[in-house]
């Protein structure tokens, strides 16, 4: 028979979490792209195009196995409702080290506008904030040299 909902959820989520850990995938970016894919598929009345999500994973075969599980899961759901729930559950913006560093540097120079902008975005992290879309992406190369301490 069909496993209970908890078992189906675990069978879908546990391999995903392992895949993400094994491939050092950025969780926020992954779930943002997955949310966008499901929403676009729902809007088009089609399945989710997971290629932008797949691009985040080095082990393409493992991703494809998980994507097949996910497609079966989505087939039994209301895609528009799933997309809405995902949009409400997956923040697009999180406080990343480089964003904090940019705001701190500006504030030290007397410009507090970036601090206010960052605070405004982080107060509504699920909203698209198109004017700050780059803040939802990968950190710039220079950010790899940022060092923070536990007391930061």
Image (cartoon, rainbow, N blue to C red):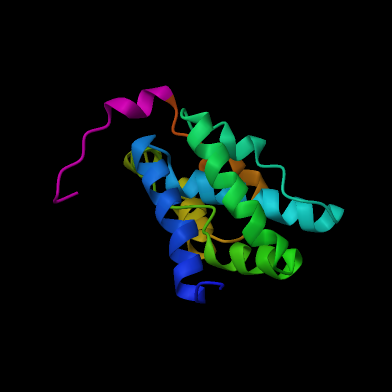
Residue 128 seen anywhere in this rendered image of the structure: no
| Residue 44 in the image, given as x and y percentages of width and height | 85, 52
Q: Quadrant of residue 45?
A: bottom right
Relative to residue 27, is residue 83 depicted above or below?
A: below
- Comparing 42 with 87, the one in front is 42
Q: Is residue 143 highlighted in magenta? A: yes
- Comparing 87 with 50, the one in front is 50
Relative to residue 140, is residue 124 depicted above or below?
A: below
| Residue 122 in the image, given as x and y percentages of width and height | 48, 59
- Comparing 40 with 67, the one in front is 67
Write the residue at 45% across / 73% down.
6
Write the residue at 72% across / 61% down.
75
Horizontal side, residue 43 vs residue 59: left or right: right
The residue sitting at the bottom extreme is 4
The residue sitting at the front extreme is 1
Relative to residue 54, is residue 70 depicted above or below?
A: below
Looking at the rendered image, the quarter that the N terminus falls into is bottom right
The magenta stretch is 141-152
The residue sitting at the top extreme is 141
- Comparing 23 with 109, the one in front is 23
Q: Is residue 73 highlighted in magenta? A: no
Residue 140 seen anywhere in this rendered image of the structure: yes
| Residue 95 in the image, given as x and y percentages of width and height | 40, 51
């Amino acid at each position: 028979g069909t496993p209970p909902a908890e078992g189906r959820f675990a069978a879908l989520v546990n391999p995903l979490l392992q895949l993400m850990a094994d491939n050092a995938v950025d969780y926020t970016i992954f779930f943002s792209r997955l949310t966008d894919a499901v929403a676009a598929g729902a809007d088009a009345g089609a399945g989710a195009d997971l290629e932008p999500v797949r691009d985040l994973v080095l082990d393409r075969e493992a991703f494809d196995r998980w994507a097949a599980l996910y497609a079966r899961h989505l087939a039994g759901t209301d895609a528009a409702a799933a997309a809405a729930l995902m949009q409400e559950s997956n923040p697009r913006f999180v406080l990343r080290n480089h964003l904090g560093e940019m705001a701190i540097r500006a504030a030290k120079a007397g410009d507090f506008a970036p601090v206010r902008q960052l605070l405004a975005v982080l107060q509504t992290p699920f909203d698209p904030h198109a004017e700050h879309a780059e803040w939802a992406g990968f950190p710039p190369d220079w950010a790899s040299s940022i060092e923070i301490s536990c007391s930061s």
